[in-house]
Amino acid sequence: MQRDNDRIIEELQEEIDHYQLIFDYTYGATVVVDPDGYIIDINKPYLDFLDVSYGAIIGTHCTKILGDSRLHIVAQTGKAEMNQVQTINNQQVLARRIPVKQGGKVVAAVGQVIFEDIRQIASLARKYSLLESKVKHYEQELRHLRSTRYSFDSIVGESKPMHRIKKEALTATSNSFPVLITGESGTGKEIFAQAIHHESRRSVHPFIRINCAAIPRELMESELFGYEKGAFTGARNDGKPGKFEMAHRGTIFLDEIGELPLEMQPKLLRVLEEKEFERVGGTRVIRSDFRLIAATNRNLAQMVSEGSFRSDLYYRINVIHLHLPALRKRREDIPLLSRHLLGLIADKEGLHGVSLSPDAEELLSGYTWPGNVRELSNCLERAVASMAGSALTEDDLPFCMQQFSERKETLRHSSLKEALNDAEKNIISATLQEESFNKAKAARRLGIHRTLLYKKIDKYGISAKSA
């Protein structure tokens, strides 16, 4: 019998020791008082905080050793007090006091110091405030990202080529397959990209644009995939999310994808295939659900054959292909488009009653527009800036347009060879102007070798000033 009692006592002692261990390792400094406010238990963190022994404090009233404690009041009222500032040993701490009830009666009260020093609370408050301002900033950024400027209503044109391409683009809004938009500079590739996003089920999520030609080669990876703290010299202390991370559940638009460095292409291919990546300097795998829309004015198929663009990446992005027609291929849209752009310019400048005269409309419709819609918009802006009346006439159009009008008259009396030379000179000059006299880009646009372009520039006496 005695042996059984000893065993029971031993088991009870083990259980008590077990609970005491848990009590000692409970987060924060914890003390328990009886209904009259006398300390009946206290854990090790609280003893360390007070710098007293367990035996010296048990049976002491809480007000004698715990400063301005209100544990005895909580034990009397049965009402908890949460997150109260309390002074113990001339040090401010944050405490909470909770009554323990049994059968409707308060049998004890538990007090816990949540923070060792009130300064920690101030520090946390500052961190919280900083975090709150960051969240507000990112919410504003997100709202901006989610709001695309263009929809299908922004695409102006009633010609057959435009009806066809708009129909193809609308079909692309019902799925999430990659889209490749090709066409000359200034044909409106980003407008189509935004319109597709705007009409898709992803429209409530971000539209993230990145120009592959505008990012330095050494920063491309960190821009696309982000970086962790300390990933490289000059990196932000808190790291930075990449464009693919920001595009989660939305659309990422890679403009001028033909300029993507060859060494980045396999990394992009992996993200497109697996929808996951790691930040620069990190090991955590980040998953992102995005739709890819890419655009270029270059011939990617030719680049594949030349070895400057990976074939596997080309096939991955070229699922839905939209080729936008050049403005000269849809001349019947030029009057409508000119009036539309003129209206936008007038609204922006606060002008009223601005119109397009028949002679100006005829000249605009006959021009070749190597810079496409972008060049047309620029031409109209320049004309509005210098126009005298409310009707934009042929005389208000830029000098290059005036020259074009005069050349049309000259061509009527020229030989075929003269006409061809004149046309070639004009096309080269306009292309150089469109590409800011970058001869490498102009040669690619014209589909000729750079050496041949130099010869023709010399032949026709074309300079940056004349172009």
Image (cartoon, helix red, strand yellow):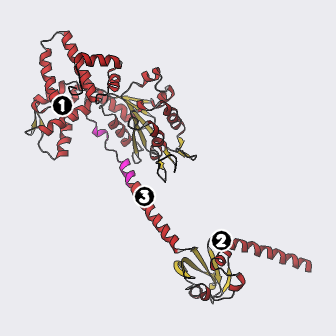
Q: Earlier in the sequence, mark 2 or mark 1?
A: 2
Label annotation for residue 305: none
Determine which of the numbered discs, if any, sits on residue 134 in the image.
Answer: 3
Q: Which residues make up the magenta segment?
A: 140-155
| Mark 1: secondary structure | helix
Q: Is residue 370 visible?
A: no
- Name the N-terminal-most of marks 1 and 3: 3
Q: How far apart are the alpha carbons under marks 1 and 3?
A: 48 Å
Q: Residue at x 44, y 32 (%)?
A: 260
Closer mark to the observer between disc 2 and disc 1: 2
Rendered image: mark on residue 335: 1
In magenta stretch: residue 154: yes
Q: Is residue 108 left or right of residue 244?
A: right
**Which image quarter is the C terminus in?**
top left
- Where does residue 457 sit, x and y in percent of width and height? 26, 19
Give residue 51's quadrant in the image: bottom right
Q: Secondary structure at mark 2?
A: loop
Amino acid type of the residue that numbered disc 1 sits on in the rendered structure: Pro
